Image: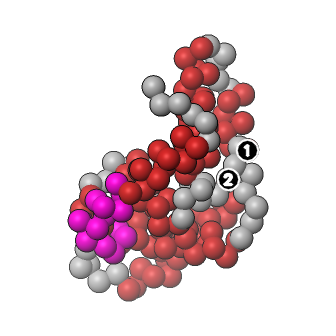
Amino acid sequence: MYMDNQEDQNDLYQEIILQLWKSYTRFQGQSQFSTWMYRVALNTAITYFKKAKQVVERNDIFDDKVKNLQSSEVDMIVESQVQYLYNAIYLLNDVEKALIFLYLEGFSHQEIGSNLGISEGNARVKLNRTKNKLQEIIKNQGYEFR
């Protein structure tokens, strides 16, 4: 979600694995291992994204996936919806991307808050605001909600 092309995704994946390995000795068991792991991964991704400062071609991955789709009307509608969402997510800041990522992964508000180091209530508020912001971005891109 933080990198567009496969090479950057692979680099980020390797960086996350390295950071997990380096910081494992600091895991104190005060939270679930998966929570700690997500926290390290998200922090690494955000840091990596900031350092890279690359111009991101938003549609590369999407275009590759579209080539493999069957050309039916349903696929075209879904393709359009995914593209609007994909483009809108790239306009969010790093924390908002993390919120949406965790939400789409099915995490509860409590787990999202724990992963991001904020309270459950704050996670709910930030997630709601981020959803509204996404909706507004998509609307401004010309997509009509049905």
Residue at horizontal 47%, vertical 61%?
Answer: 96
Mark 1 vs 2: CB contact within 8 A: yes
**What distance separates the C-alpha of mark 1 from that of mark 2?**
7 Å
Start-end of magenta stretch: 114-128
Q: Is residue 122 above or below residue 88?
A: below
Q: Is residue 137 above or below residue 120?
A: above
Residue 30 location in percent, x, y? Answer: 24, 79
Q: Is residue 108 in sight in this rendering?
A: yes
What number is the disc on residue 4? 2
Question: Of residues 104 and 17, which is closer to you in this image?
Answer: 104
Q: Earlier in the sequence, mark 1 or mark 2?
A: 2
Q: Inspect the image, locate mark 1, and give the three-letter code of the amino acid beneath it.
A: Asp
What number is the disc on residue 60? 1
Residue 132 location in percent, x, y? Answer: 41, 50
- Which quarter of the rendering shows the C terminus? top left
Question: Of residues 143 and 15, which is closer to you in this image?
Answer: 143
- Which quarter of the rendering shows the N terminus? bottom right
User: Which residue ends up furthest to the bottom in the rendered image?
Assistant: 26
Q: Inspect the image, locate mark 2, and give the three-letter code of the amino acid beneath it.
A: Asp
